[in-house]
Image (cartoon, rainbow, N blue to C red):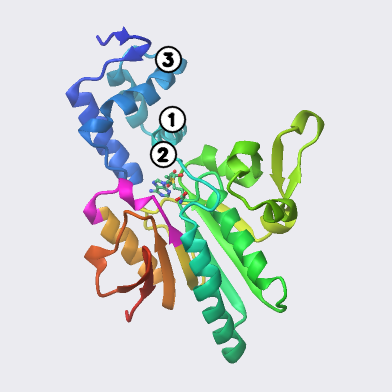
Amino acid sequence: MQTKSCGQYKIADKEFGQLKTLIKELTGINLTEQKKMLIVARLSKRLRVLGLSSFAQYYELLTETGNSSEIIHLINRITTNKTDFFRESHHFDFLKEVVLPRFYEEGMKNGRRKLRIWSAGCSSGEEPYTIAMTLQEFFHDKTGWDVKILATDLDTEILAKARNGVYSQDIVAPIPSACLRENFKKGVGANNGLFMVKDKLKRMILFKRHNLTSEEFLLNEQIDIVFCRNVIIYFDEATKTRVINHFHDALRDDGILFLGHSESVIANDGRFKLIGNSTFCKTAP
Ligand SMILES: C[S@@+](CC[C@H](N)C(=O)[O-])C[C@H]1O[C@@H](n2cnc3c(N)ncnc32)[C@H](O)[C@@H]1O
């Protein structure tokens, strides 16, 4: 029987191995030995809430057939949701100065005045709302364009936060003040210190739960731009390759893929070419 130490449960190697395999199957997230203590800390609270005395009991509960609600709790505890408004801001400069003008010019020529952007692994919404603010700024003096963002994440709790679109003062700090005034309502009374995303921005985004490692068919039209930043870093090489191939299929020819600063498409080389800082353009199929 496992014991609690300092409010935390102990985990045997076999139990860590079982959980690691289950988590990889469910999310693609590849837990290394170094993550063991972090996982124990995150899950100990859940074991306590459930009144369980060991990780063996927890694993049994998770693998009981039909226990999908506990699986959702597990996933929500395991994901790392760190994000920021205008994170890696050079991507939004590149979007505004290079990518959008190119797509705009093409659209004006060929009549496809439509733009579809996917924020894959959107966390609490800072990334899709930053994309939406950048699009607002670019399209504010242009009419007749149908511009939409699909924002997906696997974690149901973080997605609810994203949909809600309410942030504290320290979280909105990276947003330039004019942009903040334009796109957020300042809370008063009980909401003092909070900033709520305005409806005009929310209307541009569809939030949806989606697992990037699943084969579930999500899109019914081609995507122009994919943001998948700081997500595949948690996957092993085979999963990374599969997910990037999926983006290749989802993107239109010459579509753009933004990855996080330490991520690349090396294994999928030839399918994408580097055109900027961790920014890739789809090449021939
Ligand atoms: C570190 S955050 C990155 C957020 C944002 N893209 C950014 O760069 O600021 C990673 C997000 O990926 C999500 N994620 C992890 N595995 C996923 C999967 N298999 N499918 C979809 N989302 C996943 C997590 O829930 C988390 O919110």
Q: Which kind of residue does numbered mark 1 sit on? A: Glu
Q: Residue at x 33, y 31 (%)?
A: 63
Q: Is residue 278 left or right of residue 146?
A: left
Number of labelled discs?
3
Read off the magenta span.
227-238
Identify the residue shown where x is 47% and y is 62%: 91
Residue pointed to by mark 1:
70
Residue at the extreme right: 189
Other-residue count near label 3 (Cα within 10 Å), few / some / many at <14 / 14–19 / ≥20: some
For residue 239, side relative to residue 89 (left or right): left
Residue 181: where, in percent of width, then height?
Answer: 74, 51
Does the numbered disc 2 mark a residue whose Cβ is under 8 Å from ligand 1? yes
Residue situated in front as seen by the camera: 36 or 57:
36
**Disc 1 versus disc 2: nearer the observer:** 2
Residue picked out by circle 2 = 80
For the point 31% across and 43% down, the residue is 29
Q: Quadrant of residue 8?
A: top left
Quarter occupied by residue 258: bottom left
- Disc 2 element: loop
